[in-house]
Structure formats: C-alpha cells, structure tokens
Image (cartoon, coloured by chain):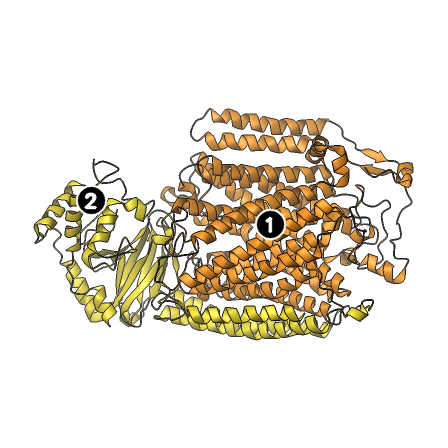
Amino acid sequence: MSTATAQKKGFGATLWDYLTTVDHKKIAILYLVAGGIFFLAGGLEAMLIRIQLAVPDNDFVSAGLYNQLITMHGTTMIFLAAMPLIFALMNIAVPLQIGARDVAFPFLNSLGFWLFFFGGVLLNVSWFTGGAPDAGWTAYAPLSTTSPGHGVDYYVMGLQISGAGTLIGGINFLVTIVNMRAPGMTYMRMPLFTWTAFVTSVLILFAFPALTVGLFLMMFDRMFGANFFDPQMGGNHVIWEHLFWIFGHPEVYILVLPIFGLFSDIISTFSKKRLFGYSAMVFAVVLIGFLGFMVWAHHMFTTGLGPVANSIFAIATMAIAVPTGIKIFNWIFTMWGGSIRMTTPMLWTVAFIPSFTLGGFGGVMLAAAAADYQYHDTYFVVAHFHYVIVGGVVFGVFAGLHYWWPKFFGTMLSEKLGKLAFWPFFIGFHLTFFIQHFLGLMGMPRRYWKFLPNQDLDLGNLVSTIGAFLMAIGAVIFLINVIVTSVKGEKVSGDPWDGRTLEWSIPSPPPFYNFTQTPLVRGLDPLWIEKRQGNGKMTPAEPLGDIHMPNNSFIPFVMSLGLFIAGFGFIYQVDDKNWLIVGIAGMLITLGSMFVRSVKDDLGYHIHKEDLEKGAGSE
Amino acid sequence: MKGWMGKSRVLFLFGIMLLTLTGCGLPNLTALEPKGEGADVIYDLMMLSVIIMVVVGVIVMALYFFVLIRYRQKEDNQDYIPKQTEGNKFLELLWTVVPILLLIVLAVPTVQKTFMLADTTPAEEDKEDAVTIEVTGKQYWWHYNYNGLEVQASQDLYIPTGERVYLKLAASDVIHSFWVPSISGKMDTNPGTGNVNEMWINAYEEGVYYGKCAELCGPSHSLMSFKVVAVSPEEFDQWVEEMKNVNPDATPESESAQAGKELFNSKGCIACHAIGSSPAAAGPNLTNFGSRVKIAGILDNNKQNLIDWLQHPEEIKPGNKMTGKYGNTDADNPLTSEEAEQLSDYLLQLNPTEITPEDAEAQ
C-alpha cells in the first residue's frame, strides 16, 4: 500500500516514517492496515466455525479449539477489527471535515494506535503459547476466572492495553472536535460523520473505564489470588456481567454511530441533496448515545435480576428504536426527490438500510424481556448482532473505504470490482444470518461446538455455512480490488465524487499539513455552498502564513512496546515469580519513555510561508 | 436496475423456499410449537412483535424501493440539481410519534408477561401440592432434588403435566442456563448461594421434551443436553413413590451385573454416583439409569453406547469430570472390555420405576 512518494524513499525510510509518524492521515493508514489484518484473522476464525457447523456431529475442530475460535472471533472482530477500522475512518476524515491541520494531540494519536496494536498482537500471541482464551468474548466469570492455562490472561492483558489506546483515541477526538474547527464551522454545521465521531468519543470516554475496571478485577482474580468474582469465596460473578455490559452495550453504539454519520454523508452526496432533517439526525444520534448507557442489562434478562429490573431495561431498550427509526426515515427522505448515483459507496449504503432495519427489528423483539427468555443465548441473538454489526458496521466500513480511498491513498478503488465484491458479500450475508434467527428459535443455543443429528437443524446450518463462503468470496474480491488499485496507482482529483464537505476541497491525498490556508465555513455542506454560490473553492479564513507542525516521535512505539513486554511478565509470574522481573522491566521502559517525553522539549517546527507558496511544502 | 431488482426477488423467494423446507423445527424441541404455558405466553408476545415489525417493515420497504426506483439518476439528466430540502416538521413528528405508539402496544404486554413469568409463589390453594425442584447445573449434566419428596434424580427431569412446577436454579461450578424451548424460556443457573433463580414450568401434555444448556460452560457446553419427562399427575405420584423406595443395595439378577456391582464399588464409581435418595451428587444420580432417555445426555441408551462411554468418556464428552477417576487403573485403558460390559449390565438393570420415558412418549 505504498504511495509513489514512499517508493522513492525506500523501504527502511518508509517503515521508520510510519513507526514515528504523528500525521493523522498516516495513522489512519496504520489503523486500516492493522485493522484489516485482524479482520482477516477474525474472518478466518469465522470460516473455521462455519465449517465445523456445516454438518451435524462434526469433528473438524476439537471442543477446546472451538471455544478458542469463538472467543477470538468475537474479541478480534470487535476490539481489533471494527474499532481500528472505525478509527481509520475517523482519523482520515474528521480533521479534514472540520478544516483542521491535524488532531489536537498528534503524539497521543500515535500512542493510541501503538497501544491498540501491541494489545492486539499480545492477545493473538496466545495462539502460539498454549492456547487462546476460551471463555467467550464476554468472558463470564467463573468460567473465565477458572479457565486453565494462560488464554484468559492474554485476553485480560491484551484488552487492557488496547483499551487504553482506544480511550486515548476517544479523548483526542473529543478535544479535536471541540477545539479545532475552522472559523464558521459551528456545531450545527458539522458534517454528520464528525457529529457521530464526537458522540462516539463521548461514549468511549464513559464506557471504556467500566471495561478497564472489570479487567483489573479479573486480572487480580486470575493472577494475584483475589476473589472478586468467586461466589465460593464471597465474591459475586454477576458484577462482572454488569461491568462488562456497562461497557459492552455502549460499545455497540461506539461502533455503529460513526457509520450512521458516514452513511448520512454518503446518502447526501450521492443524492445531490442536503441531509433531510439535519437537526433531527443530530438529535437522534445524541439520544441514541445517551440511551445506549441505560440498557446494558438487556443482555442479562436471564441472569435473574427480577421482573422490575427486566421491565425497566426492556422499555429503555425499546425506546432506542425511536431515534433509530427517525434516522432510517430521514435517510430515505434525503434520497426522496434526489438524483441518486449508484456508486459503490452508495451501493453499500443502500444495502445497509434494509439489512440494518432487519437488525433493528430483531433488536426490538429481543427487547421484550419475557420473549427474550426464548431468544437469549441462541442463534437468534447471533443473527441479530451480526445483522447490526455486519449489516451496519462492516457494510459501513466498505462504503467508507470506497468513499475515502482517494483521501487515504490518492487513488480510487475500481467501481467494477467494488460492485463485483458487493454482490456475493451481500447475498452471502443474508444467507448466513437470516436463517440463524430460525435456528435459534428451533432450539440451537449459541456457542455450540456441535449440534446433534435428527434435530431438524441440519439444513439451516448448511445454508448458513454456504452463505459464509459467499461472504468470504466477496471479501477476497475486495482485497483483489485493493491490490489492483495500488498497482495501477492512477491518481485522482481532490473531488472525484462531487463532494459537499471540506475534505473534498483539498487534493487527494491531502498534503501533510492538509489546508494551506484554513477555510472559512459559510454553512452546512460548505464545499457545496461554494460550488453553488461562489467560485467553487473555499474562501480562506486567514492569510497565507507559517504553519506550525509537530515532530515525528518514536516514543509512542517504545511506550507501548514496554507495556507489551510487561504483559508477558504479568501473565507468566503466575507460574514463576521470576517473570515479575520482565513485568517490571517492561513497566520501566514505559515509564522511562514517559519521563523522556515529559522532560524533553519538543516544540515542533514551522513550514515557512515561502515554501508553501512554492508548493515545496509537500514531501 | 432490472438486474438488481431481479436478484433481490430471487433471494427473497429462495429464503421463503428454505423456510418451508426447514419448517418450524423438531416438535418437543422448537420454541415455535409451544407445548407448555411459558412457551405459549412467550410465543404470543413474539407473534405480536413480529406483526408490529412486519407492518413497519412493509411501510419502510415500500418507501425505500419507491425512492430507489423513482429517484435514480437518469442518463440524460446528470446535471440535474435537486431542491435542497431542509426537512419537514410534520413528517419528523409523524415518524417519532407513531413508533412510540407502536412500542407502547408492545411494551404493555411485555411488562405484564415479564411479571407473570416471574411469579414463583404458588396460589394459596395449591401451596400444599405444588412440586418444587432444586435444579443444579454442573459440568456437564443436571441434578434435581425434589423438595419435600425425598427424591433425587439426574438428567431426566420428571414433572407432572397440567400444573406449574417450581424450580430453584443454581450451579455448582460455572454459570449454566436451563432451557426447555418447547415448554418455557430459559433461566441462568448461577454458582453460589447468593444468586439462586426461580422459575416455573408447566407442560400441557405428556411427552419427552428436549432440554439444553444455553450458557457457555466449557468444552462440552453443546453436549449438556437433558430431557424433561412430563407424565400425568397420578403417574408422577407413582414415580415418586417408586423412586423413594428404591433399595440401593439390591442384588442384581444376572451374574455379570453382580460383578458389575462389585466393580461399581471397587473402581470408586460409588464415591461420586449415588443410587437411591442420597443427596450426594458429585456425579449424576444413577437410581433410574436403566430408563434414561440418553446416556451422558447425548447417546442413545443401549449397552454398546454405554460401554463406549465408560471406556472413552473424554472422546465423547471433552472436559467431563469422570475421565481418569477409575481408581488406580491404567489411564489409557481404564476399563477392560469385560469390566465395561459388567458395569453396563449392572447400570442398565437399574430400572426401579414402572413409569418411564416410554410411557410419556407413548401418549
């Protein structure tokens, strides 16, 4: 995925550049590549799961390995694929959409990425050191606290480290959106993607600490002999369920809200219309974000919280359908009366609407607490959340990558291959998951290593597996598209889609300082306004002047590497206390780099006005 | 555009075809053919929500397809700039208020039924006769202690039909979840004494119903099946009497079974497996093992399967607690074929009750 300039620089220099970069666009590429690789790993795990379940009483994988596969599939897809891919999109687009030269804290941006990356690598190392975690991605105690081996230890340490990265990233985007908007870019003129990135960052800020606390308690239970979740010792495992879902439910919205925003931008662009009901859309996003924190116990209807709690959480959950419905109708009415161009990003978006609506229907059905006693922990739930996460987030990531590929790499993914990838993925998706609603009601619980013959579950499972292979074909065609596009390397203009927002007012890929002069924003869809009412270019809000830029830094990498090393120390000190030395050494590396960062002045540098005028500012 | 529509239509027809082919699932397993009060109540709620969703879905999809077909960019009109509509207050209000009303229609019965299913106090007049069973989930089997009846049983849960049977659910190791889809919804079994859950089940007709564990509990989670055997109240009373009066030390008839009984003691089976009404339940209670619907919850109940199970438990149910517990024998070959056969003969003749799953199934 090297760009033309990178090829000139040679591999070593490029590698060093990416290891030390603080540029939001390069960090976006890092997130994209890392998230993409983890997505492939998670996808491979999914395929193994579906092969195992293709026929009844199958012995393709062993029971122990199967539990590792489902755990790692869920954990990888949520934490290591969906999260970073969302961050890739947020990194590439948010600063550009608000007319900023970078995020508020470029150093933290890099640190956030490397923490996520090393956390993810640590988690996956478990495959090669005696077994991955096997207690499900929800890691319910006491199964997780008593799971033999070190699998769950890797889960705890890996997620703790990558979770810190996500939290840092969230705070960074909050500050960026609050402080770095170009003149005239008021809150109610922000593109919907930026709005949703903002709300998602708030959710990250409030949700991830719950996970951090839960993981710390579990870490002490597993590694240092505490008994927070052990009922035999006076602990209570239900506390883990609460902590996990207080994080876990907002996490769903953390993933899907930016995608809502992205779809809003795409629908508006490719219908050539202003978003219908902009303020209602903003209100709906904020409301979904708020309600997202009030519904976690709907994951625990069968835990035994009692009818009062169940009823309250049931009604709160149903309430979320209202703002979500508002969004669906507003999307449809944005297209109403428009001039719809069926480009690949639009195709994914148009496919998203019915898919996600079905996911939402499943959600309302699940919200009915009494009925959930049948759905809970069956394939109905599996079907529902894949409809929401694949039909929402994955479709959205595909749409977003096609849409913003010019801003990532300055090239355009092939429309032909894009559509060719879409169809098998779309059909495969519905084939895989629609029937799972019925499998669940027909008596197939989730996380089943095998289903026994003669229970009328054979055909449904076979169909589901066939669908999964179609999805895999779609994903492979997308990869081919990426390779073909980068080999061809045809450059495109700054505004290939006839865009409406600020990111399309600058070249593709943008220069590393983004905007030569900060633009003046005159309303919602600022570029569209200039195209209709002005000269088609943004009016600068400042005279041409020196641009202050941050220096690259290797410290975030080292800081994260320290925690990665310390992770091994903490995991293996359970067997042998000497490993504590490794833990302490890792912590010293991290603290040492924090110390260096604190005492060493790093004031950045300036690109001089004269260089900008000459156009020599580009690398 | 035509091809696009065509494809979705084919997909839709294909989906319908598949559903017809698969049907609603296996009777006595599927939740879509309720055979008990709980499942019935839930099925009604489910259908109500489906109807509401279908109504909304039809409206959304009609608008969606209309918009996609009608407002697609025309070849000859690519420069057309649509009117930049800001929104419409009336429409916004409409699609806020109508969903709220629809959700109220769903929310009211939801709350009602949630409370109804959670009401685990028997009515005053039934208090004396109500059957209460302590259900314990264990890796990877189920134990039942019939409160006040001095009956202990495992795996096959005998209940009387036509009345609410009250369950107190707990677990001894990790969380499990007790689910008999065609009779009732599920409830988690929590470890420890602080989170005991209560529910009731009520089977309308006699029959053998499939039960499953629905909370990930280890490698053999998917094999933690059990059965609910619903028999008439009279037969249930008879079953209780028969189970209560079992003599655990009765000498079997055949020689082979007698030898099996010796092995049962000498190999240490007896340390975990009770026969009779002893409450000890480190392993499944074997009082009526001969009439079990399944061996280990999953294998058909016959001698060959039992021999296989005794000789290779780890292969059949990975992670079970019986593997490697046969006294001081060779770990690779814990039982000789002869020993396994004798033990099987002993276990299969443990059949003290006239009331068996076959009675229930025959109804």
Number of numbered labels in the structure image: 2
Whether residue A432 is situated above or below residue B46 in the rendered picture:
above
Q: Residues within 10 Å of mark 2 (few under 14, many from 20)?
A: some
Q: Going by the image, does B270 lie left or right of B64?
A: left
Image quarter where the N terminus of chain B lies is bottom right
Please state which amino acid type lies under the numbered disc 2: Cys
Which one is nearer the viewer's eye here, A339 or A56? A56
Q: Label 1 belongs to which residue?
A: A82
| Circle 1: element type | helix
**Residue A205 visible here:** no
Whether residue A366 is situated above or below residue A604 in the rendered picture:
below
Please state which amino acid type lies under the numbered disc 1: Ala
Name the residue: 59% across, 63% down: A356
> Residue B355: where, in percent of width, then height?
18, 65
Q: Chain of mark 2?
A: B
Which one is nearer the viewer's eye here, B294 or B47? B294
Q: Going by the image, does A237 lie left or right of A501?
A: left
Q: Label 2 belongs to which residue?
A: B269
Q: Going by the image, does A154 lie left or right of A533?
A: left
Image quarter where the C terminus of chain B lies is bottom left
Color of chain A here?
Answer: orange
| Circle 2: element type | helix
Instruction: Label the yellow chain with its letter.
Output: B
Q: Residues within 10 Å of mark 1 (few under 14, many from 20)?
A: many
